Amino acid sequence: MPIDKKKVEQAVRMILEAIGEDPEREGLRETPRRVADMFEELFEGYEYSDEYTWFTETSDLVVVAGIRFYSLCEHHLLPFFGVVHVAYLPRGKVIGLSKIVRIVRKYTRRLQIQERMTKQIADEVMRATSSQDVMVVSEAVHLCMAMRGVKTPAPTVVAAVRGAFAVDKSLKEEVYKIIEPHRFKGFPL
Ligand code: ZN
């Protein structure tokens, strides 16, 4: 369902009033509309389909490292962002790099928490590739932590480790070795 932009505009106007701002002053007059337009893009993940084309290929380990993402924390509506690394062992089905990026967008361009996002990406990669052996690592800084409360500039790391990656320690280590140069350093960007 597309987002209700009129409603977003009204809500933003109300927030501006609630914090004691004047929604009619020059700098703010267009802000509700701008936020509504922006939300359409930031939340487009809800609209993505789950049809994936794949091709047959025999390949060992596939790792797509350092996919940048931007998402919004569902607790504070503030950005959290960083990188996602995706690894899987193909079972005859390989999906293109752009499809992996699309899966990442699908689950980042919506309200999220990093843990669920990481699991959902792993689940979708499993569905798209028909492989049980999937590993997804996400690294992110959360502005809701950086701007307020406990100020932690270090990235939060979350991993979803499935199938062979969960039982074969050396396989998991191989993934960490491959992604090492692409890891997220956090602030400063
Ligand atoms: Zn938060």
Image: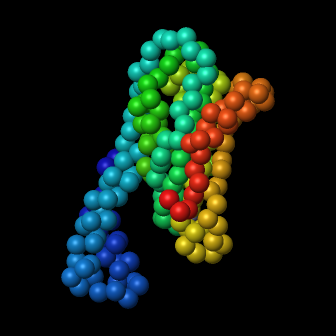
* Residue under the point 64% across and 55% down: 156
- Image position, residue 1 (x, y; %): 34, 47
Can the viewer see residue 119 in this picture?
A: no
Residue 31 shown left or right of residue 151 in the figure: left
- Image position, residue 132 (x, y; %): 64, 23
Residue 160 shown left or right of residue 111 in the figure: right
Nearer-the-camera pick, 94 or 123: 94
- Image position, residue 99 (x, y; %): 43, 30
Nearer-the-camera pick, 102 or 10: 102
Residue at the limit of the structure toward the front, as seen here: 181
Relative to 114, say whether 14 is above or below: below
Number of numbered discs: 0
* Residue under the point 66% across and 42% down: 159
Q: Quadrant of residue 61?
A: top right
Locate ligand 1 by image quadrant.
bottom right
Q: Quadrant of residue 13?
A: bottom left
* Residue under the point 39% across and 52% down: 43
Can the viewer see residue 66 in this picture?
A: yes
* Residue under the point 57% across and 29% down: 63
Relative to 96, say whether 18 is above or below: below
Residue 158 shown left or right of residue 75 in the figure: right
- Image position, residue 11 (x, y; %): 35, 71
Q: In the rendered view, how is the structure colored?
A: rainbow
Nearer-the-camera pick, 156 or 126: 156
